[in-house]
Image (tube, grey):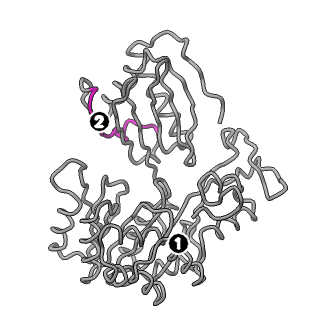
Amino acid sequence: MKAAKNTSESHPAGPSDTVRLVEELLDRAIRCGASDIHFEPGQTSLAVRFRLDGVLSTVETLPAIVADNVIARLKVLAGLLTYRNDIPQEGRIDTALSRSNGLLDRRVAVFPTLYGQRAVVRMLYKNEQLADLDRLGFPEGILAGLKAVVSGNQGLLLMTGPAGSGKSTTLAALLRYIIARFPGKSVVTLEDPVEIRIDGATQTPITPHGQMTFPTALRSLLRQDPQVLMIGEIRDAETARIAIEAALTGHLLMSTLHSGTCAGALVRLLEMGVEPYQVTSSISAVVNQRLIRRLCTKCRRAADNGYEAVGCESCLGTGFKGRTLVAEMVRLDSRLRLAILEKSDLGALDGLIWQQGYAYILEDARQLVAEGVTTQQELDSIGLIMADGEQSR
């Protein structure tokens, strides 16, 4: 990434200057392919940071005196209340104002802090490759397993991984696969918010502070004769119990759960109060995935253990360009079901999964290092491998 401009000594911008500045930053983010823009206020400056391939980099440092004007302009574009600086607000910037046809949506979230309001703009792009399940990058075995699970008529498929690991993208691709492969099926989603539009699916946004919560909406939806249900995230015990019951009564249900491993997702369901027999009877599969930055092929350099990042104009000096998927998938067998019924702890479940010969995400990642697709340091940075080379589980 090129060095950030330091404009902390500049004179305060007037209204027209602020309009141009914000427009330039938004357009610049699109040209760079940034997924998020952070406007972070400090005591003496406003830092502007772009998230590129999952990593935040500072691209501009503005004087603190213009911070309020910049945030106010973003609020105007997003249709937010400019006179309320003491509450969180969320909105959208009309994509018709963008100069890029590849941009689908721009979401703005504003939050009050000690030094003023912090704003984040989420950028969503049209990407045909990410819409196709076959092109997401799953290993053949996992891809076949996913297709087998979603071809069934009931059961729960759980996607796990940290925020920003591509879980929602995978679920959207799975829904498109179902709609194309099994036309006529009733497909309904509950999301907070709806991020990816899917033709052929009924998508319902869940507002964070509204009366229609995930449990309320899910109970009502079960009376709407759905065949396939997607819940954006299982966040609490009540949602988990209703989802499990739906999966046990003739519904194919998909959702995400924040967990570092497949075994961790199973343990978390138990900790939420779901009965072990319900877990063993309802779970069809658990998939854990990560996104890893790809080395820039124009500037990568051979090193002792594969390749290393260098940085060039093509990759904006980061040494990386684009990301790739690594994943693991676990389907419950008799030994794993017995361990869950006995309420085994995380270590025991993890060890059993390893003994059963399931392909670990670590093996997939190591292969990418060997092929020069990424680096050992990149794996360390996302917590897949610890300093001593062992898996961080």
Relative height, residue 56 to residue 112 (above, below): below
Q: Amino acid at mark 1?
A: Gly
At 55% from the left and 61% from the top, the residue drawn is 290
Q: Nearer the viewer, residue 230 or 366?
A: 366
Query: Where does residue 25 sit, x and y in percent of width and height?
Result: 49, 30
Q: Quadrant of the C terminus?
A: bottom right
Query: Where does residue 118 sit, x and y in percent of width and height?
Result: 39, 31
Query: Where does residue 155 sit, x and y in percent of width and height?
Result: 34, 80
Front of the two marks 2 and 1: 1
Cα distance between the residues tagged 2 and 1: 40 Å
Q: Which residue is mark 1?
A: 347
| Residue at far top of view | 11
Query: Where does residue 111 sit, x and y in percent of width and height?
Result: 34, 34
Relative height, residue 304 to residue 44 (above, below): below
At 43% from the left and 87% from the top, the residue drawn is 338
At 64% from the left and 49% from the top, the residue drawn is 321
Q: Which segment did they paint magenta?
A: 85-99
Q: Amino acid at mark 2?
A: Pro
Q: Say whether marks 2 and 1 touch (CB < 8 Å).
A: no
